[in-house]
Image (cartoon, rainbow, N blue to C red):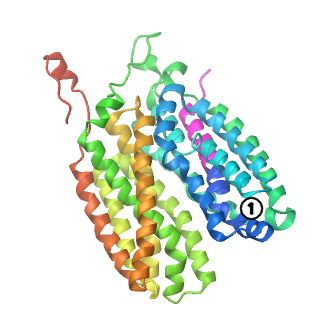
């Protein structure tokens, strides 16, 4: 007996909670353990900070590999393996006695996180949604934005029970939340009598017939498409700027005269406010041309970067908080929806993994270049202005991209077109 709720929405909910917990513990929560580790072991900030590079493996080297495997093994298996591995890594880290053991545990956590973050969760949703892909991606992606809410709980755990016990509790929590949520996920709607968005196949075809497959290009064909390069280059620009802001926002705000307490509140507000953009732009992307909505999101980011120059003025600060988080939040959803619309679900994991690799490259270049400009000029204003211009220029890349499709009517005539 079918539920009145399309099963794809249950998958969206499961992926939301996995994204929320993993992002809370690994990304936003890592900073809580920084000082306790330095105090106990006497390690330098550089040594502890290096763990952040290991933590970013799933966004760089591992992302294309994870994308390849998710297309072949399915999201459910990778989510299950990833959540189990993250839990093991967190518990092993609680037994840290040396720097090498600390790095090893972080590498294991990063490897597991590759199986339960964006590439895998977005692939699961891309297979179950087509028309409502923006709404579905927006809800799931909100889990990453909301993860900052768990930071006070992690602080309380560390302060109350110590960092070692806190890691054990968080590792067990990963299993308690991640394993059941992973088992909710199903890979292909056709295996359960559905087509994307919830229509039962018997409504569109003869009873007992499988749902018609979507005509999707292979990853080799996608790699030859120049639009794929344009989209990836735009994503590299987005993440280059985002990583720069996330890392340098507090020093910039302090440099502009804001207190450390105020700067901390503003930094925490950025991912939370991004939830608005994730929902808004995801919804708009389902209604209008995704290229136009993606371009609009880049405009929001660009305006936000220009406003960041004037955060010493309340109007500039409010404009930054209104536009920048909404823009990058919307783009984090739209990057997946535009891949789904242009190339279909068959090679979504592989293409998303490659995109995450481009993003990681931007994330490496951006913060380093931003720090260099600050060292040369004594402030961040020049680099923020440059980023505003570059973000606006990324609109050209998006508008030059075109969907990759095989025209069925042309096939019937014996010809094939790859561009709409």
| Residue 248 or residue 181, whichever sits in front | 248
| Residue 6 or residue 215, whichever sits in front | 215
**Residue 13 is a magenta residue:** yes
The segment highlighted magenta reads 1-19
Figure quadrant of residue 280: bottom left
**Residue 261 is a magenta residue:** no
How far across and down, in percent of the image, does residue 96 sit?
Answer: 78, 54
As displayed, is residue 97 above or below residue 352? Answer: below
Q: Quadrant of the C terminus?
A: top left
Q: Is residue 386 left or right of residue 188?
A: left
Instruction: Characterize the local packing of mark 1: few (<14), some (14-19) or many (20 or more) Cα atoms within 10 angstroms.
Output: many
Residue 32 visible in rendering: yes
Q: Is residue 67 left or right of residue 143?
A: left
| Residue 57 or residue 212, whichever sits in front | 57
Q: Quadrant of the N terminus?
A: top right
Which residue matches tag 1? 154
How far across and down, in percent of the image, does residue 201 sit?
Answer: 45, 19
Residue 129 visible in rendering: no
As displayed, is residue 71 above or below residue 86? Answer: above
């Amino acid at each position: 007996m079918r539920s009145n709720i399309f099963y794809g929405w249950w998958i969206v909910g499961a992926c939301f909670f996995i994204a929320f917990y993993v992002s809370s513990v690994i990304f936003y929560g890592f900073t809580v353990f920084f000082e306790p580790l330095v105090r106990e072991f006497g390690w330098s900030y550089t040594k502890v900070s290096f763990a952040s590079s290991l933590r970013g493996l799933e966004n760089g080297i591992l992302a294309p590999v994870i994308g390849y495997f998710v297309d072949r093994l399915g999201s459910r298996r990778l989510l299950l393996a990833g959540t189990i591995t993250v839990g093991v890594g967190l518990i092993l880290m609680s037994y840290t006695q040396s720097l090498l053991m600390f790095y090893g545990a972080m590498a294991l956590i990063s490897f597991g996180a590759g199986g339960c973050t964006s590439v895998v969760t977005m692939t699961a949703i891309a297979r179950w949604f087509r028309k409502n892909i923006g709404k579905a991606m927006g809800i799931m992606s909100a889990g990453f934005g909301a993860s900052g809410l768990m930071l006070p709980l992690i602080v309380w755990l560390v302060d109350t029970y110590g960092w070692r016990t806190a890691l054990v509790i968080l590792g067990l929590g990963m299993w308690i939340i991640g394993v059941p949520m992973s088992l909710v996920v199903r890979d292909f709607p056709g295996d359960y009598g559905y087509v994307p968005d919830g229509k039962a196949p018997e409504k569109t075809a003869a009873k007992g017939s499988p749902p018609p497959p979507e005509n999707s290009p292979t990853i080799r064909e996608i790699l030859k498409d120049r639009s794929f390069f344009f989209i990836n280059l735009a994503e590299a620009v987005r993440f280059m700027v985002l990583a720069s802001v996330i890392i340098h926002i507090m020093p910039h705000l302090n440099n502009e005269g804001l207190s450390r307490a105020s700067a901390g509140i503003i930094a925490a507000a950025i991912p939370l406010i991004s939830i608005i953009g994730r929902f808004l732009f995801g919804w708009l992307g389902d209604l209008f041309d995704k290229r136009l909505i993606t371009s609009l999101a880049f405009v929001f980011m660009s305006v936000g970067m220009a406003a960041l120059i004037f955060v010493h003025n309340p109007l500039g600060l409010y404009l930054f908080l209104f536009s920048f988080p909404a823009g990058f939040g919307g783009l984090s959803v739209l990057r997946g929806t535009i891949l789904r619309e242009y190339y279909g679900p068959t090679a979504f994991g592989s293409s998303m993994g490659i995109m995450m690799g481009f993003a990681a490259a931007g994330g490496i270049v951006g913060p380093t270049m931003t720090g260099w400009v600050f060292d040369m000029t004594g402030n961040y204003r020049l680099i923020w202005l440059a980023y505003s211009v570059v973000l606006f220029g990324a609109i050209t890349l998006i508008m030059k991209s075109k969907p990759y499709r095989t025209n069925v009517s042309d096939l019937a005539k014996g010809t094939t077109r790859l561009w709409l």
